Image (spheres, rainbow, N blue to C red):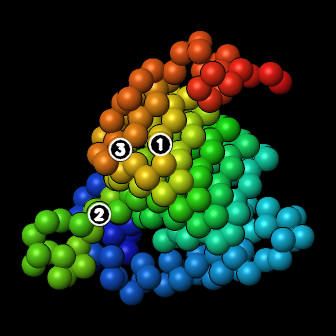
Amino acid sequence: MELKEILDRKDSGRLYFCDDPDLQAQQLQCLELQYDYNATRPAEQEKRQQLLRRMFAEIGTGCYIEPPLHANWAGKNVHFGNNVYANFSLTLVDDTDIYVGDNVLFGPNVVLCTGTHPVDPALRARQAQYNLPIHIGKNVWIGAGSTVLPGVTIGENSVIGAGSVVTHDIPANVVAVGTPCRVMRPITDRDRNFYRGDHPVDL
């Protein structure tokens, strides 16, 4: 299979073979940049920003990604809006597009996974894979240790509780938690007035 066809398949939800040598050569070039990013010193903030602009498909202003960052393609297929914050060990299985809106927060050890494999073991043994894009709306907070699976959309302003496994779409303006992740409640005016239990917002 020619590389162009593999790339077309990779970004269209169709099966392809992820062990193609030409594909892996392209991926290796991306991972070299990621290695450089993860090797930066804390004071080298401008160098980090320069590397992110080279690594990511799109990255807005005010974005901060705490190393180490782990991404299959070093962000080549990742689109970040403005003011996105990612705590330690964000993992992006970015074999196809990941879209993240403005002001999104990622807790430590969050996984966004676009790549997956067929159930049939014979196809898996041949390194068959397919990918489905992820969409995360603006102002979303994804708690520590959560995993977002291929093809999922999370609506704006929603909160995903720590340790959740998001297997299906989550609507906007809700708190959702669990394995699999389910909507627990809507975000209400009370959340604007009380930040935890009966503790009032006093800022």
| Label 1 residue SS | loop
> What residue does disc 1 label?
161
- Assign the N terminus to one quadrant of the image: bottom left
- Residue type at tag 3: Gly
Instruction: Give the class, few, some or many, for how many residues have Cα within 10 Å of label 1's Cα (few <14, many ≥20).
Output: many
- Determine which of the numbered discs, if any, sits on residue 116 in the image: 2
First-in-chain label (1 vs 2): 2
Between the residue at mark 3 and the residue at mark 1, the CA separation in whole angstroms equals 7 Å
What percent of the width, then of the height, locates residue 84?
68, 46
In this rendering, the answer to whether 93 lies above or below 192 is below
Q: Is residue 147 something one can see in this rendering?
A: yes
Query: Residue at left 35%, top 44%?
Result: 178
Q: Residue 34's image quarter? A: bottom right
- Residue type at tag 1: Gly
Relative horizontal placement of residue 27, taking residue 181 as reference (left or right): right
Query: Residue at left 53%, top 62%?
Result: 109
What percent of the width, then of the height, locates residue 48?
79, 67
- Residue type at tag 2: Thr
Observer-side mark, 1 or 2, equals 1
